[in-house]
Amino acid sequence: MNLKVIFCGALAAAFVVGFAGCSSTSDTPVPKNVIFFLGDGMGITTMTAARIYKAGEDGELTMDTLPETAFIKTYSNDAQVTDSAPSMAAYMTGVKMNNEVVSMTADTSAYDKNTFVSYVSGADSTCPSTNGAAVPTMLEKAKAAGLATGVVTTTRITHATPASTYAHICHRDGENAIATQLVPNGSGYNSALGSGVDVILGGGLAYFQPKTTTGSKRTDARDLVAEFKTAGYKFVSNKTEFDAASANDQKLVGLFTSSHMSYDLDRVANATNEPSLADMTSKAIDILKGNSRGMFLMVEGGRIDHALHETTARKGLQDTVAFDDAIKTAIDKMKVIDPDLKNTLIVVTADHDHTLVLNGYAALTGKTTDANLGVLGLLRSYIDGITSTDAGGLPYTIIGFGNGQNRLATRTALTDADVFAATYHQEATIQTAAGSETHGGGDVFLGAIGKGAEKFTGVLVNTEVFGLIRGIFGL
């Protein structure tokens, strides 16, 4: 017999007021569900282009339907234009830190201040012990509160954005050290993760395999996959195995590729044996929802950023759409679990901008199909539909970049077939090395739905997002 229930019920009947220490119904904790979506490099112009690409100018993405919105300032502690490590860490810790630093104090440097040499050697960390200190992350706080936790990404799981949720290191490139922080019970494990992150899905298998394995990036003999299994995790390495995993697998690790997962365009075209970002998000929720205290789940659309660095806009827009599909999946599933989202907050944002631009003055294009290039095509005037030309008389595309590998002055006349290719590199004003288009410094979008979503409004600094989420759920 539950004496506490009888006692509290009697007090309520006698005094018609609550009593400290008595719950109104039962001892079951009120769940706290936080799903944090991060579109890596997804600036506002990229969102606009992705909307046109998928649905036309008058269409909408799931992101567009979120009821509460804000603009986010993304600068880092030492740079006007941030990289992914400190920008994601700002969301996860509430601390502004220096570029390339993962979830450490603001005084932490990624470089030796005398030689300006990075504090890493290959994928191994050489961070001095006196160089800053770890700061708690939102995932660690969720774990301490008894919530289920998950990290889902299309990049390497050890890459800067996912690493910022569970690891602490002075330079993002120390991915071997980052990997060891994720594996329970072993040397280097981040003990703040308790029994471990419950669901881990992404790429980066090479950082978890012993150095004797072909393709391994490790410099030691540790088999971190075997260590995961010893710690009670189910391990999957392809979509077939992934599909067979169930909600009964309370600890799940999926590492589907040696490095980053495929671009969504390539995943579909090449019929790769990899789950989509929406698939991984769905599976993570199915497993994490088993915890009555709730969940903290981070989902990253990481390859948006990589495609934009390459200036391959078609890949970038398709990955943005795949990211949006994962958001829709999460909202739909959480509305089944928590119909009015009274105990659920879903936040969607980006860590930084890129230099992608939409050139004017194009006629309306509608959505992109095999028969219609849409926003990916050559720019045709809204006045007469004739292809617009530059000062040299050559046609150019609607989408361009501020910098990138394909500079205007080096090209010949373009055709629709040229610019629609998945591997086409959009034109850039300033030429850089291949794959080296830079981030931009523009503000980014944030959208929110569910419990406390109305608190996200106006113009916010990225560190303030951490404080708002903590305040809403008391983490």
Image: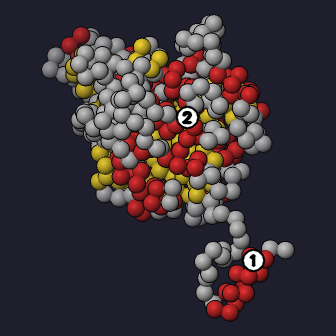
Could one spot residue 31 in this view of the protein? yes
x, y percentage for residue 461?
31, 49
- Residue type at numbered disc 1: Val
- Residue type at numbered disc 2: Asn
**Which labelled disc corresponds to residue 211?**
none
**Which labelled disc corresponds to residue 5?**
1
- Examine the image and state in which quarter residue 396 appears: top left
275 to the left or right of 118 = right
Q: Residue at x 55, y 41 (%)?
A: 192
Which one is nearer the viewer's eye here, 375 or 239?
239
- Examine the image and state in which quarter residue 204 appears: top right
x, y percentage for residue 399?
32, 29
Question: Within 10 Å of the Cα at label 1, are there few (<14), some (14-19), or many (20+) other Cα atoms?
Answer: some
Q: Is residue 453 above or below residue 186?
A: below
x, y percentage for residue 405?
30, 15
Which one is nearer the viewer's eye here, 36 or 50?
36
Q: Residue at x 31, y 22 (%)?
A: 111
Q: Secondary structure at mark 1?
A: helix
Q: Furthest residue to the left?
A: 391
